Image (cartoon, rainbow, N blue to C red):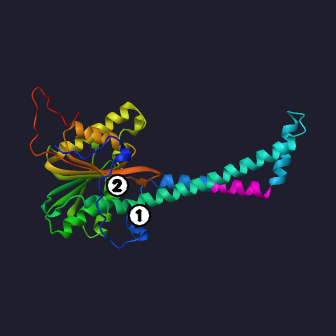
């Protein structure tokens, strides 16, 4: 079994696949797919606007604010330096609110970019990891969302003249209906089907798919327990085991995710996956992200006294 994984995340130097040219800008992508989790973007923008207004008010009413603070300080101290302390407090507060506004606007911009343009670009890179889409009969997109990655897979099937199909799995039936609409808008509706289901218990038989992909989804599994808890990590590993279970021997898995990539690599090693590679770092949603690829072995080789693995864990 060959592995190209190094022990520390910062040392991964595997080459990332080149994105496929689509000649699209973010407005075209947004017009078709919209954006998942728009509530987060709205939350960031509202707070950014609030802190901006607050910092502007502090700038225009600096002297009255200083006098108000000075009056308050005189009630608790008899120090003659209350004027300087009041001006420092007002200036410091104004600086903090202005910096907070800038950071929140930046976070909102990065969230929007990561959800739309970067997500589309990474989808093109992910499909480039599969050398021959014409031989793919069944593919699965776990956590398909609005369908950016799902439709990228379907487009590859269409380009190669494949008779294959790609299945999109999502927790919400409402989302899957929206995904089917975007597939029709992209002209790949005949290659796409969607199902509602839980990634921790996939509604598919063992060894069912030639290719399994997932984009910024696995890290959300088990979030009800908190991202850093042991229970959440166990749920993510269970989801990864399900991904491996439904993959055919010799099949390819491609996962783009944030934060927890090192634990995915360790789990894939435990499951005896082959040709594990990790892409270089790409910043998404203000944190590091990587694409992990692997191949399920054709014929598992078991050593003497070795316990046979259960994908479902």
Sequence-earlier tag: 2 or 1 = 1
Picture quadrant where residue 150 is located = bottom left
Would residue 70 be seen by someone viewing this image from the given angle? yes
Considering every residue shown, the one lying at the far bottom of the view is: 23
Q: Which residue is mark 2?
A: 145
Q: Mark 1: few, some, or many residues within 10 Å (few <14, many ≥20)?
A: some
**Is 52 part of what is drawn in magenta?**
yes
- Identified at 37% across, 72% down, the residue is 24
**Is residue 6 or residue 307 the one in the foreground?**
6
Instruction: Tell me if I can see residue 208 in this picture.
Output: no
At x 42%, y 66%, the residue is 30
Rounded to the nearest angstrom, the CA distance separating label 2 from label 1 is: 15 Å
Residue count near mark 2 (Cα–Cα under 10 Å), binned few <14, some 14–19, many ≥20: many
Secondary structure at numbered mark 1: helix
Q: Nearer the viewer, mark 2 or mark 1?
A: 1
Residue 201 among those drawn in magenta = no
Q: Which mark is residue 144?
A: none
Left or right: 85 as drawn, with respect to 220: right
Q: Magenta span: helix, strand or loop, mainly?
A: helix
In this figure, which residue is indicated by the disc labeled 1? 117
Instruction: Point out the stretch of residues depicted in magenta.
Output: 49-61
Under tag 2, what secondary structure? loop
- Give the quadrant of the N terminus: top left
| Residue 154, image x, y percentages | 23, 63
Tell me which residue sits at (11%, 26%) in the image.
305
Q: Position of residue 35 (x, y in %)?
A: 42, 59
Q: Nearer the viewer, residue 144 or 86?
A: 86
Q: Is residue 291 above or below residue 237?
A: below
Residue 106's x, y, as percent? 55, 57
Coordinates of residue 294 in the picture (x, y in percent): 22, 48
Q: Is residue 77 left or right of residue 106?
A: right
């Amino acid at each position: 079994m060959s592995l190209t994984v190094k022990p520390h995340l910062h040392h991964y130097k595997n080459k990332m696949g080149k994105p496929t040219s689509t000649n699209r800008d973010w407005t075209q992508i947004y017009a078709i797919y919209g954006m998942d989790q728009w509530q987060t973007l709205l939350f960031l923008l509202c707070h950014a606007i609030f802190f901006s207004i607050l910092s502007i008010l502090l700038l225009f009413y600096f002297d009255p604010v200083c006098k108000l603070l000075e009056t308050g300080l005189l009630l608790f101290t008899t120090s003659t330096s209350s004027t300087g302390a009041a001006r420092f407090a007002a200036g410091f507060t104004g600086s903090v609110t202005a910096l907070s506004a800038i950071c929140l606007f930046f976070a909102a911009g990065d969230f929007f970019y990561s959800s739309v343009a970067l997500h589309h670009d990474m989808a093109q890179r992910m499909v480039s990891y599969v050398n021959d889409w014409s031989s793919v009969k069944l593919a699965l997109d776990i956590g398909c969302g609005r369908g950016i990655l799902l439709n990228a897979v379907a487009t590859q099937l269409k380009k190669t003249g494949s008779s294959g199909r790609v299945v999109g799995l999502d927790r919400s039936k409402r989302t899957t209906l929206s995904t089917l609409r975007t597939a029709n808008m992209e002209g790949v509706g005949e290659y796409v089907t969607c199902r509602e289901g839980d990634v921790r218990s996939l509604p598919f038989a063992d060894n069912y798919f030639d290719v399994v992909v997932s984009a910024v989804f696995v890290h959300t599994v088990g979030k009800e327990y908190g991202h850093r808890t042991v229970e959440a990590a166990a749920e993510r590993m269970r989801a990864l085991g399900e991904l491996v279970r439904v993959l055919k021997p010799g099949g390819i898995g491609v996962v783009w995710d944030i934060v927890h990539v090192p634990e995915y690599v360790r789990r894939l090693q435990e499951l005896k996956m082959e040709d594990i590679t990790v892409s270089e770092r790409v910043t998404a949603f203000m944190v590091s992200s990587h694409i992990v690829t692997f191949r399920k072995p054709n014929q598992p080789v078991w050593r003497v006294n070795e316990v046979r693995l259960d994908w479902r864990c």
